[in-house]
Image (cartoon, rainbow, N blue to C red):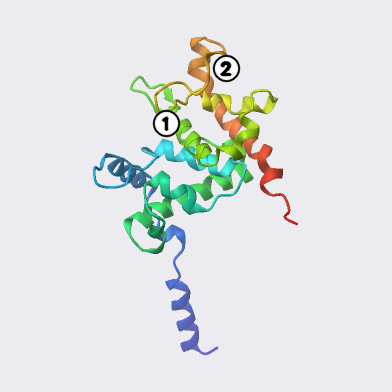
Amino acid sequence: MTVGNRRKAARATKSVKTMADYAMPFDRLGLWISERARSTSLRRPQATSLSMLDGAVAAVVAGPISMNPEEWVCPLLGVDADAFNHDTEEFSAIAATLMRHNAISNTLSTKPESFEPLFERKPDGEIDAQPWCMGFYAVMNLRLLTWSRLMNPNIIEHRLLLPILFHCVDPSGRPVLAPERRGPGTRSFTQNAWRDIPAVVEAMRQFWMPNRYQKKV
């Protein structure tokens, strides 16, 4: 290869952008989501905070099936599928979301003990796991039938969902879990249920793995 051809090849290689090149910084994504959630003219995102988006992405990674990005990214960010085709700020937000997906997937695959959900904090400094859990639950609701095995309270694996569903409410603001399924009615349990979430997310990923990666005949 001549020097000129090598230079052309190098320029061509440099011109190929990766997802990381398009992605806005993760903290900027949080501001972008908040601004979009407050807008009266744009489609409202299901994820209204960075913590909620983080929980949603974790559900995609640990869930029972692989989902096409458009299926979950569009409702979470409040964008149309066509946003995947244009170099706009919306696509920059999409890219940042997919980068977060890849980061969580890599962590759970290689070093699951280091997985840390992006929980919010209350004014008094205590952990507020509800936004994260509501994001997780939002993705469950996109394919609720596929999650049905874990939704059955009669199987032991149902307990994997309890620390998450414990923090979730329905559209009317009522707890998703009935009182008899919310666990011990103690202040300690209420304050510390979130501590089990990192472990149950990885356990769910392992539970669904045979189903998710089964060989197709």
At horizontal 59% and vertical 34% (from top left) the residue drawn is 201
The nearer-to-camera label among 1 and 2 is 2
Instruction: Identify the mark at residue 118; answer none if there is no mark.
Output: none
At horizontal 37% and vertical 56% (from top left) the residue drawn is 92
Q: Secondary structure at mark 1?
A: helix
Amino acid type for the residue under numbered disc 1: Pro
The residue that label 2 is drawn on is 181
At horizontal 44% and vertical 58% (from top left) the residue drawn is 20
Quadrant of residue 122 in the image?
top left
Quadrant of residue 90 in the image?
bottom left
The residue that label 1 is drawn on is 131
Which is more N-terminal, label 2 or label 1? 1
Label 1, label 2: how far apart the Cα atoms are? 20 Å
| Image quarter in which the C terminus is found | bottom right
Q: Is residue 103 left or right of residue 44?
A: right
Of residues 9 and 70, which is closer to you in this image? Answer: 70
Quadrant of residue 87 in the image?
bottom left
Q: How many marks?
A: 2
Q: Position of residue 62 (x, y in %)?
A: 59, 41
Label 2: how many Cα within 10 Å (few below 14, some 14–19, many 20+): few
